[in-house]
Amino acid sequence: MTHHIWLLVGNDKLYQHPKQEMKRVLDVGTGTGIWAIDFADEHPEAYVIGVDLSPIQPVWVPPNSAFEVDDLEKGWTFTLPFDFIFFRSMIGSFRDWKKMVFRAFQNLEPGGYVEIQDNLYPLLGNDDTIQRTNILRWSELMVKAADAIGRPINVARDFKSMLAEAGFVDIVETKERVPMNRWPKDRRYKELGQWSCEMLSRGLEGISMDLLTRGLDMPADEVHVLLAGVRQDLLNTAIHGYWDTYGPSQTKRQV
């Protein structure tokens, strides 16, 4: 579902940079591996490596792809550089984003590209209808909890400066609004909102319970009450909230 939303944001493109032929591609935090598999199918000339902490990828994959279980926060041990390194939906995963961006720079061929696609917390509003809502309070608490455990979720606006600091050139940053539900009149944004609402509804407890109880010491029953209110807000199209998404922040290493 996340993959589908990002395809909608990116106009059905797996990536946005202009490079056509790529020999080695790295998908950081590959998750189920769906992006890496789709990329491998689309680019048979490339060898795609997906890395994640969990071995949740399928067994049967394209012959030009592979998956590895590794913690890239502890170090990158690749022996050959990549033409393209891809990050998506990784907010909250790293303690030091600057270090991860610099490691990407170190492991990239001259002329190679990096793209980062992610969303920004907290929830933003098209007007004042998000004020005093459960979903706004929840998103602000999520930011505080993530900061408390040292894994921030409000870093997307800083990607451009991080890339520049690491040494990348020709940085292109795009920003898109993803509505929290079907409130927009525009057909495309209405569809984005529908998928966004469904995805958050399904994963709400999974992304919230541990973070809020561990980061802010919230009692579990208090979290359950809050999440019940968030689910109600998600179905309320009178609330005109949206998420800022930054994706891609594409850039290349100088030739």
Image (cartoon, rainbow, N blue to C red):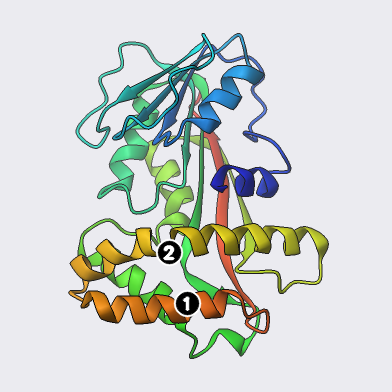
- On residue 169, which mark appears? none
User: Is the C-beta separation of discs 2 and 1 under 8 Å?
Assistant: yes
Mark 2 surroundings within 10 Å by alpha-carbon count, few (fewer than 14), some (14 through 19), many (20 or more): some
x and y, in percent, of residue 137 in the image:
41, 81
- On residue 230, which mark appears? 1
Residue 35, quarter of picture: top right
Residue shown at the point (29%, 47%) measured from the top left: 94
- On residue 204, which mark appears? 2
Residue shown at the point (26%, 79%) measured from the top left: 221
x and y, in percent, of residue 222 in the image:
28, 81
Residue in the foreground of this view, choosing between 47 and 104? 47
Residue in the foreground of this view, choosing between 218 and 47? 218
Residue in the foreground of this view, choosing between 238 and 130? 238
For badge 2, the amino acid type reads Leu
Residue shown at the point (52%, 10%) measured from the top left: 64
| Circle 1 SS class | helix
Residue in the foreground of this view, choosing between 88 and 182? 182
Q: Is residue 214 left or right of residue 123?
A: left
Calculate the distance from the C-alpha at mark 2 to the C-alpha at mark 1.
9 Å
Q: Is residue 199 left or right of residue 146?
A: right
User: Total label count?
Assistant: 2
Residue 211, quarter of picture: bottom left
Residue 113 visible within the image: no
For badge 1, the amino acid type reads Val
Residue 239 visible within the image: yes
Q: Closer to the N terminus: mark 2 or mark 1?
A: 2
